[in-house]
Each structure stands twice: as structure tokens, then as C-alpha cells.
Image: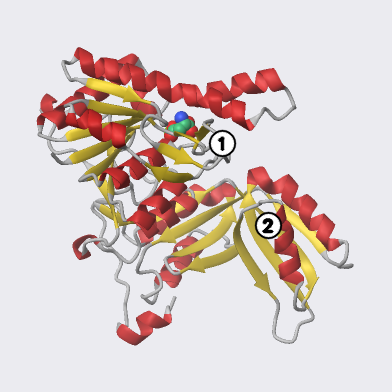
Amino acid sequence: MAIVVQKYGGTSVASTERILRAARRVAWKRSQGYDVVVVVSAMGDTTDSLIALAEAINGDAHPSPREMDMLMATGEQVSAALMAMALQRLGVPAVSLTGFQAGFFTDDTHRAARILDVKPDRVRKELEAGRVVVVTGFQGIDAAGDLTTLGRGGSDLTAIALAAALDAEACQIYTDVDGIYTADPRIVPNARRLEEISYEELLEMSSSGAQVMQLRSVEFARQYGVEFEVLSSLSPLPDEGGTEEKKTKVVARVNPQFQRVVTGVAVNSKVARITLLEVPDRPGIAAKLFSAFARNKIVIDDIVQSGGPGATQADISLTVAKDDLDVSLDICREVMQEWPGTQLVYDVDVAKVSIVGSGVASNYGVAATMFTALAERGINIEMITGSEISISCLVRASRAAEAVQAIHEKFGLGDGDQPVAIGTRGGEDAKAGQK
Ligand code: ASP
Ligand code: MG
């Protein structure tokens, strides 16, 4: 029988009622003739509460990463056991398995372990015995036999990796929204649900601030070609008279019928900008600065260096996560000691607004349309960066929502909107990556 992996996130199993409701959805899927494997997150904010307990015990000291994993892995065990019981109560044979029992072997990087291998023999055996298999998300076991966790939001990764290992027919990620939208519907009321989005676009949307799924799991899905669906567990059940479930499919290649130049608009308010002014303009300077960031394991969001032709000095601006700002400033101050005259400024009242779409690089007028939308509202652009499939503008944090609305409207991305006409010059120009 065809296997379907369904993952239910924290909000989908936040209470016993929700667990029972999710169980009915699982039962329905099974009644359609599928072997169902369920991956669950911890109930609601359980993982945060567990971390708070550890902080209360440890004070300022860093808790042992091994013990943190031991602690955090309990959250998923609670929901997995309860989900199995809920299924049994509905008359569906079910069994819960830990990450270890389900065959998740990882390295020993506690709190952010990498999956080395998935050997789901036990899962297969249980399916063959006619049971629904409920697997704890977010956890595995290392070579020493210690529990590990896969990083926050790691249940997504469990589901995707299991779907790959079982060669599942479908992988369904149930959350509290019924898909990926052209923009955050709380900011843009007429944002439209996307029928399909590519891995690349979703990665770009997520790293640009639209948090739907754990980034690592989308990367894993792309690498292994696991297509999946994002759906809402709060939507009507199919056996409650609900029609076909609304969803967004995350795919390798978007069906041309759904393709647009710009797929969505994302905003990231969690960035800070650092600028080094009047840095010496000679080989090795950027290498030195960014090697220092690398040694400190700081992820850089965007980098811009400017300086006219023939200049002896340059300005380097970069954005980092606000949480990394203090460490980042220390790194800059340290490196700058050798560059007299260089000044350091930073700003936390900024937000990054991005357009994402696989057609961004191959169509002309995309950047012009975005910048015009901002100009019409008098919103100043403080830094511009771009990639093959995105253009980002740093704006005042206080204007970020308005910027998203203006851009969304200008491109005509919403429900009932007329998409703006943007040109492609075809073949050669498309390859040249015109913006
Ligand atoms: N419970 C874990 C977390 O909150 C894993 C997950 O929800 O995916 O990060
Ligand atoms: Mg979660």
C-alpha cells in the first residue's frame, strides 16, 4: 500500500481535543487506503517551557547540551503516546515509536544534530502489521546511544526524512495555516494562498522572514527531491463535510499554470544593520573581517560593499540577526583595531522587505516596479541586495508593513488583483540575469 507521512506541529496537538481531532484526520486518511505514518511535535509551547525549566536550574551557566536533549526529547514523547492512544480510541491500531526506535541515527551535535542515516525497519514492520505508526519528531540517537535533537522546529525534518526513507507517496505538513501565502495575511488581508511553490522560493521566503517551516528541512527536501504539502489541521475534516483540503504544494518545478514573475513578499524584522565606514580598500580586508565572523559561527544575512572606482576606501554594510548584534559588534571592533580611521555604526530599527520569485532575474522591470511602489509611499530604501530569485530592501522598521502592502499591491499579487505586466526579453537576456 502507498505510504503517506503526516506531520502535526505544536499547535495541531496543543490540547487533548486537538490531538483527538488530528487523530480523526489520520483515521480518515487510512480509510482511503493508505498506510499512514504520523510525526508529532511537542504539545503547544512545551519545548519552550522545558527550556525555561533548564534555565531556572542553570541560571547564567550553560546547561549541558546532552542533558538539554534528554529534556527536550520528552515533549515529543508525550504527544506521540497520546496520539497513539487517540487513534486506538477511534478503533485504529496504532503504535508510537521514539526517534531511536524509528531508526534516526545522527551525529553528536546536541541541539542541532545532523541526520546521518534513517533505517525505518521497525516502522515498516509495524505498517505491515496494519498499524498506524506515530513517530516522535525532532529526535534521534548518536553513535554513543545518546538522545539528540534536530534543532528547533526539527519535527519537520523528521517528517521529510522519513518520507524520503520510506519512499512515501506524499508528505503532508499540518500546521495552523492552510498553506504558503503571497504575504503574511496579517499584514496583507487579500494575500493569496499559493497552489505551488518551488523549494528555492520557499527557502528564500523563509530566510527572508516568512516562517512556515524549518529551513533545514526544506533544504533536505530539495536535496532529496521530497515534494510535500503544507495544510491546516484546523480546517474542516473531510468526513465533516469538508471539501478537498486547501494546501500549498512544495515542488521541484512549479506548474507553468501557477508561475508568476514574483511569487511573494516577505519581511524580516529580526535583522540589524552594521556598517563599517572608510575601510581600507585593498585585497584581504573583507577576508579578514568575515573570517572573524566565521570563527564566531555568526551567520551573515546580506553584505554590500561600496566604493567608487579608484577609491582607496570602501564602506561595508552587512545585516545579521538582531540576536547576534552584540557579538558581531565586538568582532568588528576587534578587527578594526588594525584599520585606523574606520568607523562603526549600527541600526536595529530596520526591517528587510523582499520580493521572491523564480522570474525575478529573467524579467526586466521587476526592480523598477518594487522601488516605485516604495517611492510612491515615500519609503526610503536604505540598502539593496539581490539574488537570482529575490530583491531585498532595508527600510525603517516602522514602515515595513506599509512597504509590504505597497509592493504586494503594485505587483498585483492578491486575490482578485490583476497581476502587473512585466516583460521578459527571452533567451539571451533572460540568461544575462537582467534586473
Ligand atoms: N518541539 C520542537 C520545537 O518546538 C520541534 C518542533 O516543534 O518541530 O522546536
Ligand atoms: Mg514547531
Left or right position of 34 against 188: left
Question: Colour scheme in the image?
Answer: secondary structure
Q: Residue at x 18, y 34 (%)?
A: 35
SS at badge 1: loop
Does ligand 1 reach within 8 Å of label 2's beta carbon?
Answer: no
- Observer-nearest residue: 286 or 141? 141
Decide if residue 69 is in sight here.
yes
Q: Which mark is residue 422?
A: none
- Observer-nearest residue: 68 or 205? 68
For the residues bearing labels 1 and 2, Cβ distance under 8 angstroms? no
> Compared to 426, does 81 lie above or below?
above
Residue matched to label 1: 111
Q: Mark 1 or mark 2, which has the lower sequence index?
A: 1
- Observer-nearest residue: 141 or 293? 141
Amino acid type of the residue that numbered disc 2 sits on in the rendered structure: Ala
Left or right position of 424 against 279: left
Q: Residue 201 at x, y = what percent?
A: 38, 58
Neighbours of disc 1 within 10 Å: few (<14), some (14-19), many (20+): many
Q: Which mark is residue 294?
A: 2
Neighbours of disc 2 within 10 Å: few (<14), some (14-19), many (20+): few
- Residue 162: which quarter of the image? top left
Amino acid type of the residue that numbered disc 1 sits on in the rendered structure: Arg
- Residue 352: which quarter of the image? bottom right
C-alpha gap between disc 1 and disc 2: 20 Å
Decide if residue 212 is in sight here.
no
- What number of labels is visible? 2
Left or right position of 123 against 155: left
- Quadrant of the rendering where the N terminus is positioned: top left
